[in-house]
Image: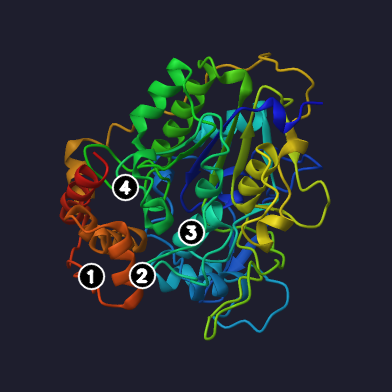
Amino acid sequence: MATLNDIDHFVVLMLENRSFDNLLGHLYPGRADYEGLKGTENNTDGKGNTRVVWSDPVSPQDSWLPTPDPGELFADINEQLFGTANPGGGTPTMNGFATNYMKQGGAAEEIMHCFKPEQVPALSALARSYAVCDHWFAAAPCQTWPNRFFVHTATAGGYENNSPAHFPYRMDTIFNVLDRKLPNGWEIYFHDFPQSLTLSRLWDHLDHFEIFDEFLADAKSGHLPSYSFIEPRYFADESWPNDMHPPHNITYGDQLIAKVYNALLNSPCWEKTMLIVIFDEHGGCYDHVAPPSAVKPEDPRDGQAFAFDRYGVRIPAIVVSPFIKPGTVFRSPNGQTPFDHTSVIRTLRKRFGLSSPLTVRDAMAPDLESVLNLERPTIDGREPVQALSVPASDDAVALDKARLAPLTDFQMAVNSTVAHLTPLIHGVSVADHLQSLTSGRFKAAIPQVNSPSEVLPLIRNLIDKLLP
């Protein structure tokens, strides 16, 4: 069989806030080695009604579900998993999704909705043509920032929510330790704002941040780096968000998946490439499989609210390579420690000869070598994939309304990030800014913004000056 040494280019696309059941629960109905939906899974809502998972009838309007945005704070996720915001331990019952969603102002039945494969055709085609992991868990039962930190640093630094901000985030990153080990370097490709820019150890490496169009150009020319990390569009701007974050239309995220894959399929680098499509966390969307306990990445700080000793909810995870048999379903080869976001770090460390882990978490994580189950690359049945067309209703008028929509918690956290990074565009050195942040001398003046239209000019100003 192939090994990781047969792979020269690793590409990770991390999307936002969907559970495994939400997008892939119906992928392989009745398949014995695939833990999807049976159709009887349910929750009781706050009024005593039983709400069963559902998908039919399929409607174009489903693409916006759930609307509004589900709860994704640490307390919300505890309630979704255990039925209470303050669990005492034990195995999650997975019975609090409907009740918690009603507290966010949503209809209980919407959080129990799960998509059919034909509604996410690009994601589903890749899952069937290559490999899908049905036991890949978010690194922690937390929201976006902690889980994105885990894929880069194998820890969240002890912070279970996006906000309040705790700058500077000084955790060691896989980019830093790989910096002089990779034959072709690394790049972070982004659309509007790279959340990875919150990590202060990357502030001395701003030349590694590129707009997404550069990824397409690098793939076409055969000049892909050894490690590419892709971030989606988080805000409604000239285009719709393609991050899949509820209530954003999932069609745009599926189009991004197709664009990334098709660019790689047609790249001179293809035979030596592994594409990993994952989601940061479940975002409040229903899943029926209880997350297991996890090893703590490090000893908790005094006063830390959560020890990070539990995984988060299952998320969709697809691995693509010409060294993978179509129809592959995989789980951890040791049957104990499951795949999570730190498996990306473990895979990169194994491939490029880095013996020292970032934390205990990536030391324990399984790597992705076992999913390479062919001896030689094959293109049999590997064709370009296509997402659904853009809905006709998503016209310029609708996009204008989206620019005025209330900010998600993640988008508000980006606004805070911009304020904390602003000194770097006014001549303050990275070293001096880190010192002022660490000492508490710098107090960010965070603008009061209410919509993407108000925060986007601030983002553009920062990006244009910081990442020219």
Mark 2 or mark 1, whichever is nearer to me: 1
Q: Which residue is mark 4?
A: 193
Quadrant of the drawing holding the C terminus: top left
**Left or right of residue 332: residue 216:** left
Tell which tag, 1 or 4, sits nearer the viewer. Answer: 1
Q: CA distance from mark 1 to mark 4?
A: 19 Å
Of the two numbered discs 2 and 4 on the same chain, state the one appearing first in sequence: 2
Q: CA distance from mark 2 to mark 4?
A: 17 Å
Q: Nearer the viewer, residue 305 or 442?
A: 442
Numbered circle sitting on residue 212: none
**Type of amino acid at the residue the image marks with label 4:** Phe
Residue 228 versus residue 466: which sits nearer the camera?
466
Which residue appears at 33% of the width and 77% of the height?
A: 439
Confirm or deny contact between disc 2 and disc 1 (CB under 8 A).
yes
Q: Earlier in the sequence, mark 2 or mark 3?
A: 2
The spot of residue 5 in percent (x, y) is 71, 29
Q: Earlier in the sequence, mark 3 or mark 1?
A: 3
Pointer 1 residue: 444
- Answer yes or no: is residue 256 visible: yes
- Across and down, in percent, residue 214 comes to 36, 28
Residues at marks 2 and 1, CA–CA distance in whole angstroms:
10 Å
Which numbered disc flags the more N-terminal residue, 1 or 4? Answer: 4
Q: What coloring was used for the rendering?
A: rainbow
- The quadrant in which residue 348 appears is top right
Q: Is residue 386 above or below residue 206?
A: above
Q: Residue at x 34, y 28 (%)?
A: 213
Query: For the residue labelled by badge 4, is the local secondary structure a helix, a strand or a loop?
Result: loop
